[in-house]
Image (spheres, helix red, strand yellow):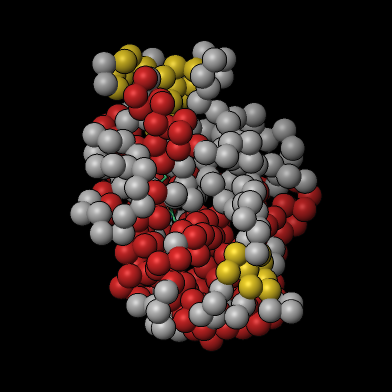
Amino acid sequence: MKTNLWSHADVNDPYSIYETMIRESPVYRDEINRVWGVYSYDGCKTVLNNHAFHIPESVGGNELMFNDTVLNIRSRLTRLSNGITHEIARHTALLLFERMKTVEMDSIIKDLLRNDHHEKETDWVGSVGKQLPSTVILKGFGFNDDECWLICHQMGQLVKIMSLTGQADLVNETAKEIYHTIENRLIAAGFYMTIIENLSRKYDISKDDAVAYCVSNLIGLLIQGYDACRGLLSNSLLQLLNDGEFLRGNGIAKERVQKAVIETLRFDPPVHNTRRVAAEDLQVNGYKIAKGEIIIVMLAAANRDPAKFVNPALFDIERANNHEALTFGTGAHACVAKHFSIQLATEALTYSLNLYKNMKLREKEIKYEPLMNVRLPVKMLISLY
Ligand code: HEM
């Protein structure tokens, strides 16, 4: 029996599942889990571009007793909201992004690799993947080294506010502490009052509410960076280290690394799917989706649709249309950090591969986190030579 729900920890090759589904059932109703799965490129785009497909509310309510800080952050995150809340939250995230300063990354990466490596080997996921995106974002907003260290080391707890899982008291405590650190830092930043006044005037909300939108969405940027960006750093390095041809020669050019990162985003992306709920009776490729039904939008399957990408199972950095992959979503909820993520991964990989010209993977078998929507290596031991 086919299913639309499985964990990446249990599936070695999700791409063969996608190939079969696109061929046999590009829009599939999984009766056991009572969810639709949309696999074709066309179908995924139709769903993402239709405003009547909403972001679903979290299931199960607040049984684990998360505190007001966690619930207030969630209620204002652009990633999780619909309607006017989404409009305010997305605007907030974009205003914050505009104010984020560009940070020189080489010395940060060098430190991360040096701090964590032991006898010329390190876990790329733990040392760089989990720390670099948050550090770059925090430094871009002027956080000092102590604040960066404190927040980066608590990200593993903080991300649990997205799924409302984990030990509630730990998540509650972490969220409260990080909320206050971020609020204080933002208050000290020169641009802060301009953003607050801008939001408060434009959307007729109180200044306190505008403050909460700012702090919550900065936390949102950190969370997306910790999960998705870590996956991009890991999956791209995997492609590069497995391609002996790529690494041959003395210098690794940034333009080629960038092309490899962009093709990795199509070929082996960190984000595999996202969810929507039908706000009214709707059609997708001739299938009727009833009001209230949940749809899993299989972005990673769409990226392997032969109707869109010629010879989709081939990793080809010169592919003409790989930038049309759906990995960053599209429509009203499209990722706000596409260029940031591609640039961060390109620079981090170019620098690291030129610093350690004979870098190799120490273990062939990669295990993935037990998650359904993202494909994130748990660990990647690499040698640093
Ligand atoms: C490689 C890395 C990334 C991938 C593959 C990715 C992918 C996505 C996808 C698929 C969505 C749309 C979700 C949906 O439509 O339901 C999204 C939304 C979003 N992403 Fe990313 N993302 C990445 C990195 C980041 C980073 C580093 C940040 C922040 C610094 C970020 C911030 C956001 C935000 C705020 C949204 C919500 C936008 C909205 O709902 O209006 N993303 N991302």
Residue at image x 47%, y 30%?
Answer: 17
In the rendered image, residue 69, in percent from the top left (x then y), is placed at: 65, 52
The single residue placed furthest to the bottom in the displayed view is: 107
Residue 150 in the image: state x and y as whole percent. Answer: 69, 72
**Left or right, residue 251 beside residue 366:** left
Rendered image quadrant of residue 50: top left
Give the quadrant of the N terminus: top right
In the displayed structure, does residue 171 sit left or right of residue 197?
right
Image quadrant in which the C terminus is located: bottom right
Q: Is residue 104 above or below residue 19?
A: below
Q: Is residue 13 left or right of residue 325?
A: right
Pinpoint residue 344: horizontal percent, then vertical percent.
43, 70
In this view, 376 is above or below 136: above
* Residue in the foreground of this view, choosing between 5 and 82: 5
Could you tell me which residue is drawn at 74 percent across and 37 percent down?
Answer: 64
Q: Is residue 156 visible?
A: yes
Q: Position of residue 169 (x, y in %)?
A: 79, 49
Looking at this rendering, what residue extends furthest in the left direction? 320
300 shown above or below 95: above
Q: Quadrant of residue 123?
A: bottom right
Q: Nearer the viewer, residue 97 or 66?
A: 97
The structure residue drawn at horizontal position 36% and vertical position 43%, both measured from the top left corner, is 313
Q: Residue at x 68, y 74 (%)?
A: 121
Of residues 160 and 119, the one drawn nearer to the viewer in this rendering: 119
Look at the image and tell me whether residue 191 can be seen. no
